[in-house]
Amino acid sequence: MSDVLLSIENLSKGFSSSGRRIAALDNVSLTIAAGETLGLVGASGSGKSTLSRVLLRLLAADTGAIGFEGEDWLALKGAALRRKRARMQMVFQDPLAAFNPLAAVDTVLDDPLRIHDVVPRDRRASEIAMLLERVGLPADYAFRPVRSLSGGQRQRVAIARAIATRPSLLVLDEAVSALDVTVRGRILELLVDLQREMGIACLFISHDLAVVRAVSHRIAVMDGGRIVETGPAASVVAAPQSDAARALVAAVPRLVTEPS
Ligand SMILES: Nc1ncnc2c1ncn2[C@@H]1O[C@H](COP(=O)(O)OP(=O)(O)OP(=O)(O)O)[C@@H](O)[C@H]1O
Ligand SMILES: [Mg+2]
């Protein structure tokens, strides 16, 4: 694929737990092209969240390198790192854990606009209205406390906040896993629309292959800290090559029978 946005090279991360060493990431290499959605799937404990945390620089890798928008991402520090953080944003499983539930939606959305100086102060209110429209929420939701919203609405706010800084990459770790099936489908549709309209690349992480399949161009499969398979989404689902991918396909029977 052309235009490599993110390149992860030989990333490793170990944890010591009750005297034992766990290789949560074992020599992981991946690339994501500009505008591409890469699905990352794997059983519980395979290392998906560790990869997202290292990528977001919430956790330091033991070894390895990450190139992002042509820069050595792991070497960035201080003001340069803060500036660049605007370009890689995260959506978590639980939006209430990610922002103050007592805050009104406009405060939640104003923070990134102000911190990253996205638009001048007098244009922030109109920018917030635009962000709400973009994620399918009525403009008057700006004044509602986040905790008064439903799970799906909160996740729309989390997505609006993530796109506020005009990132080139969104990292979504189990972002729809807590939602019921109908709401989940609508949020996945929103993500696909945003991805098409804004050309944002996504690393979409889930333990659920059906969910990953619905949004991804390519799929990478993790098992025991390693990437054991990558390929076009349709091929990984139709003809899984690794034991880990076969197990994930078998766990979703409708994937096998559903024509695509
Ligand atoms: N802070 C930590 N200390 C010790 N071990 C950890 C730590 N964080 C993760 N691990 C271990 O690293 C491995 C990978 O965990 P990780 O959370 O990345 O998996 P995951 O694929 O995201 O799983 P899930 O699907 O359940 O979210 C697991 O064995 C986990 O127990
Ligand atoms: Mg996880």
Image (cartoon, rainbow, N blue to C red):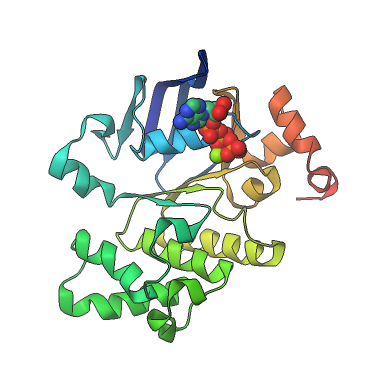
Work out whether residue 199 or residue 228 is closer to the camera in this orientation and state it: 228
Examine the rendering and report whether any part of residue 1 can be seen.
no
Residue sitting at 51 percent across and 64 percent down? 155
Does residue 212 lie above or below 10 as drawn? below
Residue sitting at 78 percent across and 45 percent down? 255
Work out whether residue 259 or residue 143 is closer to the camera in this orientation and state it: 143
Q: Quadrant of residue 53?
A: top left
Residue sitting at 70 percent across and 30 percent down? 245
Residue 95 point in image, percent of width and height: 48, 59
Does residue 197 lie above or below 212 as drawn? below
Q: Quadrant of residue 99?
A: bottom left
* 161 with respect to 42 (left or right): left
Extreme-bottom residue of the structure: 140
* 74 with respect to 200 (left or right): left
Residue 13 point in image, percent of width and height: 43, 22
* 183 with respect to 239 (left or right): left
Instruction: Tell me the quadrant of ligand 2.
Output: top right
Residue sitting at 60 percent across and 22 percent down? 224
Examine the rendering and report whether any part of residue 54 can be seen.
yes
Residue 61 point in image, percent of width and height: 36, 25
* 210 with respect to 59 (left or right): right
Residue 7 point in image, percent of width and height: 38, 31
